[in-house]
Amino acid sequence: MADFIEAYKEIRGAEKQVQLKHLSQVPGVYIPSLYEVTYESADGAIKSIEPIDKDIPALVQKQTYRGNTLSASTVVTEKAAWENIFMVEVVRSCPEMCRFCLASYLTLPFRSASLEGSLIPAIEKGLTVTKRLGLLGASVTQHPEFDSLLDYLNQQKYDDIRLSIASVRTNTVTEKLAKILSNRDTKSITIAVESGSDRLRKIINKKLENEEIIEAAVNAKAGGLKAIKFYGMVGLPGEEVEDLDATIEMMLALKKAAPGLRLSLGCSTFVPKSHTPFQWFGVNSQSEKRLKFLEKQLRSKGIDFRPESYKWSVIQGLISRGDRRLSNLLELVRNYGDSLGSYKRAFKELRGELPELDFYVFNDWELEQILPWNHIQGPLPITTLKKHLAEAMAIHNLEFRI
């Protein structure tokens, strides 16, 4: 930001085009109008993405803050989405690198807030205005000093606070953690397991075994927690019907191992994200059937199953993989009322001016295809993403469609 402001000072009185070209030289600044996109045809794939002249960088490299002072709330109000909670960012990014996960791949490297220099001062300040504290991060419990943070929050002077914690890593759910959370008015925790299948978790690089998941549930109950919400996913690359059966078996094993603990499985559909190894895969068109299969099997056995809307996941896929040609479509959708039917109506009206829905959402893309974000580089180059994809495809000699 400092570099951007200094660059702007130099040309603040110039013509807009001069300003834009000057600011494009600042690392990390992307100005879409300075890049020209051509297509194989109006409704075909992208042919090229090129800067409009030789002075514009051909590749925009994402810039990453690498300090250990992370964010905290500046406003605490009852009108916030999370009412009266003081939020403290404990970690940024995630070291696990599940191959579908934007939160890991796009935000690397993994960083943690300094305990003494950032976290504790922020918490002390926040608890002067509210008794509700939220710890944020994609993998909060993997902070290198998380145990020390727990000990700090376990002090008697904080007996009256209510502590909330973001999704936790399964193998960090100890009885101590559960007990402290329970004593701080937390009734449940959330764990992302994605699937009950060891095979599928290896494909997506989810370093987790079913035994660890069961142990986490046992520890949660022993520590006084009342419930666990698990996050799962259908339609992941390489998924077979047997993997769904494994998820059902896992949930039944959890129910047996920790009787009385309320279990729920929130389940979404895999949506490919840019700058991840799975960006070349489309949404699996069998996902809706698979959600219904899990719903029928689990609810009949008394397990709370909470599926996300498959149809809205399709729209997520459209926006996730869309290119500039979607702009007209999104404007029409807005005018037509933002409903699912609005998308169908807009595609019909714009037929021939952009690819069909299947191209954006369901089709697997060729590895050498020019992607809409080819000129934007995240923390890892595309060669590394392809290498990670190849590692996933090599597991059990799987042959994906790409």
Image (cartoon, grey):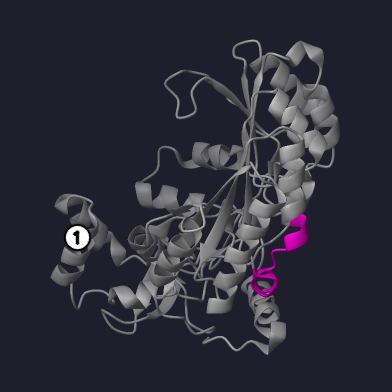
Choose top left, top right, bottom left or bottom right for residue 81. Answer: top left
**Residue 259 as seen in the image, left or right of residue 285:** right
- Viewer-side residue, 25 vs 376: 376
Q: Is residue 74 visible?
A: no
**Residue sitting at x 67%, y 78%:** 392
Which residue lies under the disc numbered 1? 341
Tell me which amino acid carries mark 1. Answer: Gly
Q: Assign the magenta stretch its main secondary structure.
A: helix
- Labels in figure, total: 1
**Residue 333 as seen in the image, left or right of residue 266:** left
Task: Give coordinates of residue 388: x percent, y percent.
Answer: 68, 74
The verdict on residue 153 being magenta is no
Label 1 crowd bin: few (<14), some (14–19), many (20+), radius 10 Å: few
**Residue 58 as seen in the image, left or right of residue 187:** left
Task: Look at the image and tell me in which quarter the N terminus lies.
Answer: top right
Magenta span: 197-212
In the image, residue 260 above or below residue 78: below
**Residue sitting at x 62%, y 65%:** 249
Task: Give coordinates of residue 273: x percent, y percent.
Answer: 51, 64
**Residue 19 as seen in the image, left or right of residue 1:** left
- Viewer-side residue, 325 vs 57: 325
**Residue sitting at x 71%, y 30%:** 181
Task: Give coordinates of residue 14: x percent, y percent.
Answer: 40, 43
Q: Is residue 123 visible?
A: yes
